[in-house]
Amino acid sequence: MDLAVIACIAAALAAAVHGYIFVLETLRWEEPGTRRVFGTSEQQAAQSKQLAANQGVYNLLLGVAALAGVVIIVAGARGAGLAVLLAATGIMLAAALYLVMSDRTKARAAVVQGFFPAIAVITGLVALGQAA
């Protein structure tokens, strides 16, 4: 199987996860379920709402960029699409690694945030190397 296909699937799944994170951080930040996920009190959520929304928009845009890479690959510009896909998923992976390195108690969240990007980066790099 072409590894670019696996990279595209992983990037699309990473985009979906980051889209869901956008919903939590931007649209549902102060809801009790979201506060439980992020471990914040009602007061902390109210005070950090703007920061969380800004972070949520970042997550959404990273997902959009990953999907743009997939679309570019499907349109036939494999090298350019892989470059965009790798940039977006590489940033996602770096953020997940930073999360777990800065707070080991966030390992589960880092795996959720970084698993699909890691698969996309690994398979995308190999696919890029095969195309050369």
Image (tube, rainbow, N blue to C red):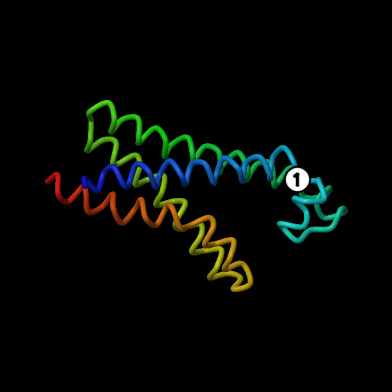
Residue 117 percent location from the top left of the image: 42, 52
User: Please, which residue is most extreme toward the left here?
Assistant: 132
Residue at label 1?
Answer: 29
- Where residue 72 sits, quadrant-wise, is top left
Q: Compare residues 3 and 18 and report the one nearer the observer.
A: 3
Give the residue at x 69% y 47%. Answer: 52
Relative vertical location of residue 104 with respect to residue 46 in this rendering, above or below: below
Residue 105 percent location from the top left of the image: 63, 72
Left or right, 120 with reference to 37: left
Residue 3 percent location from the top left of the image: 24, 48
User: Please, which residue is most extreme toward the top here?
Assistant: 75
Helix, strand or loop for disc 1: loop
Give the residue at x 46% y 45%. Answer: 13
**Kind of residue sitting beneath label 1:** Trp
Left or right, 41 with reference to 113: right
Give the residue at x 52% y 63%. Answer: 98
Left or right, 131 with reference to 110: left
User: Please, which residue is most extreme toward the bottom here?
Assistant: 104
Circle 1 Cα neighbour tier, 10 Å, few/some/many (<14 / 14–19 / ≥20): many
Give the residue at x 55% y 68%. Answer: 100
Left or right, 68 with reference to 104: left
User: Please, which residue is most extreme toward the front here?
Assistant: 1
Residue 41 percent location from the top left of the image: 84, 58
Q: How many marks?
A: 1
